[in-house]
Amino acid sequence: MEKQSTEAKSPQPSVLNCIDLSNPYTNQNVILLKQACTDSGFFYIINHGRSHDFMDEVFAQSKKLFTLPLDQKMKLLRNEKHRGYTPLLDELLDPQNQVVGDYKEGYYVGVEVTEDDPESQKPFYGPNVWPAPDVLPRWKETIEKFQQEALDVGKAVARLIALALDLDASFFDKPEILGEPIAITRLLHYEDKISDPSQGVYGAGAHTDYGLITLLATDDVPGLQICKDRDAKPQIWEDVAPLKGAFIVNLGDMLERWSNCVFKSTLHRVLGNGQERYSIAYFLEPGHDCLVECLPTFKSDTNPPKFPSIYYRDYLSQRYKDTHVDLHIYKH
């Protein structure tokens, strides 16, 4: 049965600001960034210092993983700490509109903490699940290098965001926020399937991201769409074009909470067009013990906080539980 459409037809291209990290005039970047954060919550980062060759190598290693036979990938199945392989349809981001899970497979890599380290008791810290080096040589080294490089870019962006919030540039560098972040790399491979919203079929269902910011590197296949006003009827979706060498950056739910909804955590999704699509998302999240609450300058007697305070570990744990199938379904 065809689902009743709640969206406008024919998405328009989205026009996003470009933030040049090589620009010595920080104030120009802060102005552009603030405009983006209050409008769509999405922007491009260019001249971030990571070479095309390096990013091509990361994508090549990602592709090698996803082209392994399914039985080999299932040996790397995600664990309770959300490390490892996520099969097709494993994630359901928009249960109101999706009839099946996302038509994508993924691979989670987080902060590497050995099992004998007390920090590994935290929900999102622990050892990673790595493919054997004889199966995928240099895979682990390449992904670990990407994690460090992405963290450096993310922290540079976070300093600009702090200035855009009229805070000290180092606000997010605190130990409980980005000093000990929950930083998650997710490699993604979308099937060569055509999405059909009228039938509840999506590459990735509509969702917001959970943390501080997401850095997204994509191949040249389009598919990402954003909806600036999630409450509009019909919803208006805009296409976000791939930009070679850039990171597409979007704000997460915690920035919306810190700013009392002045900065936007925007609804986004992926629609397949019949081509395979690869992307790499780096989720820069606050630390486990970060208490996220409305910043003093964004609340008043007439504009009280719209959200209660919450520890980030609790928020993230609930969101993962809500959107991933129970691991027990994979047990034989």
Image (cartoon, grey):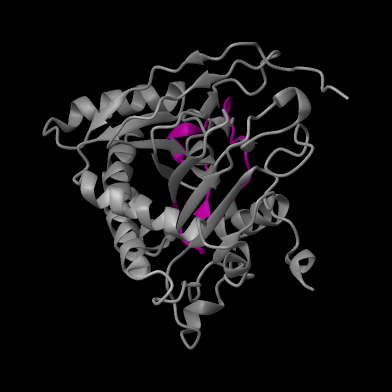
Q: Where residue 24 sits: x, y (%)?
A: 11, 34
Q: Residue at x 39, y 76 (%)?
A: 133
Left or right: 244 in relation to 281 = left
- Residue 168 seen from this side: no
Q: Does 298 appear in magenta?
A: yes
Q: Does 287 appear in magenta?
A: yes
Which residue is situated farthest in the left direction here? 24
Q: Where residue 178 sits: x, y (%)?
A: 37, 57
Left or right: 177 in relation to 329 = left
Q: Quadrant of residue 272?
A: top right
Q: Where residue 13 sits: x, y (%)?
A: 46, 15
Magenta highlight range: 283-309
Against 329, residue 293 (above or below) is above
Q: Residue at x 55, y 73 (%)?
A: 122
101 or 291: nearer the viewer: 101
244 or 211: nearer the viewer: 244
Against 114, residue 283 (above or below) is above
Give the main secondary structure of the magenta stretch. loop
Q: Where residue 171 sits: x, y (%)?
A: 33, 49
Label total for image? 0
Q: Quadrant of the N terminus?
A: top right
